[in-house]
Image: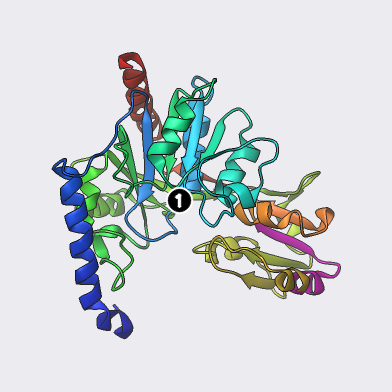
Amino acid sequence: MNFLRKLLFPFAILYGLITAVRNYLYDKGLLKSYAFDIPVIAVGNLSVGGTGKTPQIEYLIRLLSSNYKVATLSRGYKRKSKGFVLADANANAETLGDEPFQYYKKFPGIQVAVDADRRNGIEQLLSQKQKPDIILLDDAYQHRKVKAGFYILLTAYDDLFCNDFILPAGNLRESRKGAQRANLIIVTKCPPDISQLAQENIKKQIGLNVPVFFSFVAYDEHVYNGKESLKVEAMKPKAKILIAGIAKPKPFFDYLRVENDVVMAFPDHHHFSESEILDIKSKAEAKIIVTTEKDFVRLEAEIFAAQLYYLPIKSKFVANQDAFDQIILNYVGTCTRNG
């Protein structure tokens, strides 16, 4: 803990007390949680950002959408719209937020909705003529007003929740005890070759009697724009600008960067100003621009299409992928039959 965070420790104690009281009231039924008759899977974390929720939601979409009608429900962080919005042909990153709009573009067969009030969002989805079979709640681990049927907790390999402390002294949104709500835990952003011994040590640190899985970020071998793709190895020597507005951009830059590349890092979910767009264009000149998939949906309307590319990522399991899939499919199948 650095010096500034040590100074903020008393505020962390106060914040921790407030969140603990809130959780106690929900646990005892003094504050009401609402459950629903269809499978609802919440994917989230205890820490602030950077655990890989988006690729994990996309993994679940791929797993489930061939047999079920899937909907995603997000808050729609930094969107300019209000209330419940169901994505349609007029949707964009400003009306949905960057991550939901990314889901909408990549998976046209699913419903994508945003609403800060998850209860209202679920009720609105279930009132649609074509209502979903399954709802995936994106970043809703602390949204206690809705009681999901299944909770997936993500924690990053290099920033485990069990070694962290509550805000503002640490990065946790609530006490580590919140992990007890999880049905399973995924340690994300692991080295692909993480040893079995290291996995067992992490499980001991977590110390919960729930399944723990380990995943890593798999970068695509190509970058894409609306019309074409380029192989990463062939693209790397080209003069380029790398742009990322994500929580932890270093692995993205490390994967693509070579000497003399221009690197531009922005805050997570960043909305690019007119002056920033002009700055990017002036630095680009004859260079290509490579960005993250999340940033691409915000930049594609501003940058010359043939110049701008994005690098997709996927969440992959180090091992035991079939076991993870079966746990999810068993929950969904049982819940669907009961419903």
Q: Position of residue 79 (x, y in %)?
A: 57, 54
Q: Is residue 33 above or below residue 256?
A: above
- At a point 50% along the width and 50% down the height, the residue shown is 217
- At a point 38% along the width and 38% down the height, the residue shown is 119
Q: Is residue 132 above or below residue 5?
A: above
**Residue 285 sits inside the magenta stretch:** yes
- At a point 75% along the width and 48% down the height, the residue shown is 225
Label 1 residue SS: loop
**Residue 267 sits inside the magenta stretch:** no
Residue 313 appears left or right of 126: right
- Which span is picked out in magenta? 279-291
Q: Quadrant of residue 174?
A: bottom left
Report the residue marked by disc 1: 192
Q: Quadrant of residue 112?
A: top right
Q: Residues within 10 Å of mark 1 (few under 14, many from 20)?
A: some
Residue 224 appears left or right of 321: right
Q: Which amino acid, by three-letter code, is at mark 1?
A: Pro
Q: Is residue 130 above or below residue 271?
A: above
- Location of the N terminus by quadrant is bottom left
- At a point 45% along the width and 26% down the height, the residue shown is 126
